[in-house]
Image: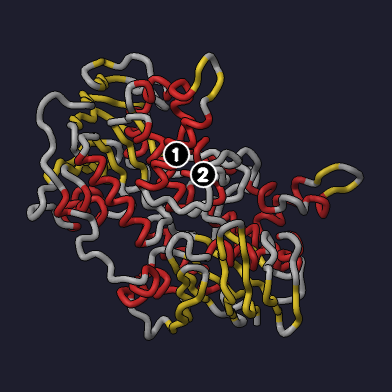
């Protein structure tokens, strides 16, 4: 039995955890849900040893523990599979699996790669992943890397005597349905010899996988329910402290878009091995959603618009100008803002504070002769923190320390404060709780109403249908079907799936 008893944690200006009691038994799968900022991440980091509690105690089988770092937690069987993944992508699979524990394969100063590969295959077999241990990790799909993360954690079985407690932090956030089902089968099978703590904003998945569910709000546990008696609507209400807006996607705010000169025109655009002969227009005030399965080419189209990847044929026109050079700096200069899927990697800069992240793309606007006007930067940041209700104790706080929803708001503020009127949203609600999603949907409607053109790759088909004026289905890199998204006449899930697969 792993237990936290009356655990407290404070940060400057924030009471992050308030007398939290939490238990997970041998072989149990425990769900953990709550809004961004509810305290889930802090609780997970205390369990994993990255943070130390200010009050309360931690016990394992009745013995009080205090971990000073994750290494100590791992030595007691606590492992974590991270949402943003902790693998080093330019290392091989086997090097990642045994990172920090390579010494067992070293003889006379020489690494026995054959022995490491054999041991890695043993770990990969636990998660039913058939890949070459010597393959560079960047060559794997996201789902495969997720399983490598799990295999890495399972190496603890050979290093400790006790039971394992494995923390799963949003493990399904970008997985396809069949990949989620595979992961769930693995977790259920592994629960015979390990306990799991499953954190997710997909409440239906938490109900499906978990034995019990802890609901957190404002740093406290507000309820513990068995999955057999839990209800999605009831849990959502406890998470946000109010009824969820029935107009979840703000369809009543969907105004008609302009039909004059388009902001973007794709005319027969292709990129080798990514997409072929794609054509569409994006107008002011329009939310255009690209729908397709993982790898269909949607994300590559976004990156082409922004300037990160150049097409091999066809014509791209932005605001009447045919684009011949593709570079991110040029995209920014044209008023294109990009909110990437991997916000912690590409969206924000960890180590820089809130106001620095907001002004990063527009430093010329806040400098004279190379000297930054920090006061003006801070004034702008305070304005956007208020406008978007960004939860931060101070604009000087490291942006990497904010919750996912608030990080997403900082990224949107960066582009909107700089005047971007073409906004590219790649899974903007990935990993966000229901309240933070509603905030993003509200921002989408506000940007659209202000005349911005938005190209969206949505997290779910329901999100695509609810938010979009126009939906374009892409399959295997090719245009399949265009749907009009007028309120009251939106396509059904079946309409989209029928052309996606």
Left or right: residue 47 versus residue 255 is: right
Residue 347 or 24: which is nearer the viewer?
347
- Residue 223 in which image quadrant: bottom left
Determine the residue positioned at 36% across, 42% down: 426
Q: Which mark is residue 381?
A: 1
Q: Could you tell me residue 308's position as x and y percent? A: 42, 27
Report the front residue among 99 and 331.
331
Is 6 left, or right, of 223 in this rendering?
right
Q: Is residue 374 left or right of residue 270?
A: right
The picture places residue 97, in percent across and down from the top left corner, at: 67, 53
> Which quarter of the figure has residue 331?
top left
Residue sitting at x 34%, y 23%: 311
Residue at which label 2 appears: 395
Q: Secondary structure at mark 2?
A: loop
Please tell me whether residue 96 is drawn above or below residue 169 in the rendered image: above
Query: Residue at the spot x=50%, y=17% of the render?
Result: 368
Do residues under tags 2 and 1 come within 8 Å of each other at their CB atoms?
A: yes
Q: Residues within 10 Å of mark 2 (few under 14, many from 20)?
A: many
* Residue 144 visible somewhere in the drawing: no
Screen quadrant of the N terminus: bottom right
The image's mark for residue 202 is: none
| Residue at left offset 38%, top offset 25% | 332
Distance of label 2 from label 1 (alpha carbons) = 7 Å
Q: Position of residue 253 (x, y in %)?
A: 16, 50
In terms of sequence position, does the residue under pointer 2 or pointer 1 come before the other? 1
| Above-or-below relation of 156 to 256 | below
Q: Position of residue 324 (x, y in %)?
A: 33, 14
Dot 1: what SS? helix
């Amino acid at each position: 039995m792993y237990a936290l008893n009356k655990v407290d944690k404070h940060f400057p200006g924030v009471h992050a955890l308030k007398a939290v009691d939490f238990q997970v038994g041998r072989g149990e799968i425990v769900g953990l849900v709550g809004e961004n900022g509810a305290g889930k991440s802090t609780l997970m980091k205390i369990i994993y040893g990255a943070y130390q509690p200010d009050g309360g105690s931690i016990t394992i089988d009745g013995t009080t523990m205090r971990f000073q770092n994750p290494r100590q937690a791992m030595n007691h069987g606590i492992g974590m599979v991270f949402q943003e993944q902790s693998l080093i992508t330019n290392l091989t699979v086997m090097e990642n699996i045994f990172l920090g524990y390579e010494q067992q394969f070293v003889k006379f100063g020489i690494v026995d790669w054959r022995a490491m590969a054999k041991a890695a295959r043993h770990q990969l077999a636990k998660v039913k992943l058939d890949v070459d241990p010597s393959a560079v990790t960047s060559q794997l799909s996201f789902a495969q890397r997720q399983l490598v993360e799990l295999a890495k954690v399972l190496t603890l079985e050979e290093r400790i005597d006790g039971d394992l407690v494995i923390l799963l932090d949003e493990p399904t956030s970008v997985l396809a349905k069949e990949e989620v089902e595979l992961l769930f089968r693995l977790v259920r099978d592994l629960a015979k010899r390990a306990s799991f703590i499953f954190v997710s904003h997909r409440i239906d998945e938490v109900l499906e996988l978990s034995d019990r569910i802890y609901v957190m709000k404002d740093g406290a546990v507000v309820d513990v329910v068995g999955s057999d008696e839990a209800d999605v609507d009831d849990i959502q209400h406890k998470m946000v402290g109010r009824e969820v807006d029935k107009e979840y996607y703000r369809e009543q705010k969907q105004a008609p878009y302009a039909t004059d000169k388009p902001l973007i025109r794709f005319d027969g655009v292709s990129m080798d091995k990514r997409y072929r002969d794609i054509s569409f227009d994006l107008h002011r005030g329009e939310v255009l959603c690209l729908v397709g399965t993982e790898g269909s080419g949607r994300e590559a189209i976004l990156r082409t618009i922004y300037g990160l990847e150049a097409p091999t044929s066809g014509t791209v026109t932005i605001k009447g100008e045919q684009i011949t050079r593709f570079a991110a700096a040029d995209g920014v200069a044209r008023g294109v803002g990009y909110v990437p899927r991997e916000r912690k990697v590409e969206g924000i800069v960890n180590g820089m504070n809130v106001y620095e992240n907001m002004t990063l793309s527009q430093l010329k606007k806040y400098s004279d002769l190379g000297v930054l006007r920090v006061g003006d930067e801070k004034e702008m940041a305070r304005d956007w923190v208020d406008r978007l209700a960004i939860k931060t104790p101070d604009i000087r706080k490291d942006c990497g320390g904010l919750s996912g929803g608030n990080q997403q708001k900082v990224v949107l503020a960066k582009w909107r404060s700089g005047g971007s009127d073409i906004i590219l949203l790649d899974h903007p609600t990935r990993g966000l709780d229901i309240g933070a999603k509603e905030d993003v949907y509200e921002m989408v409607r506000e940007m659209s109403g202000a005349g911005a053109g938005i190209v969206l790759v949505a997290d779910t088909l329901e999100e695509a249908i609810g938010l979009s004026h126009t939906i374009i289905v892409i399959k295997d890199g090719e245009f399949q079907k265009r749907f009009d998204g007028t309120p009251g006449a939106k396509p059904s899930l079946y309409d989209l799936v029928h052309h996606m697969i």
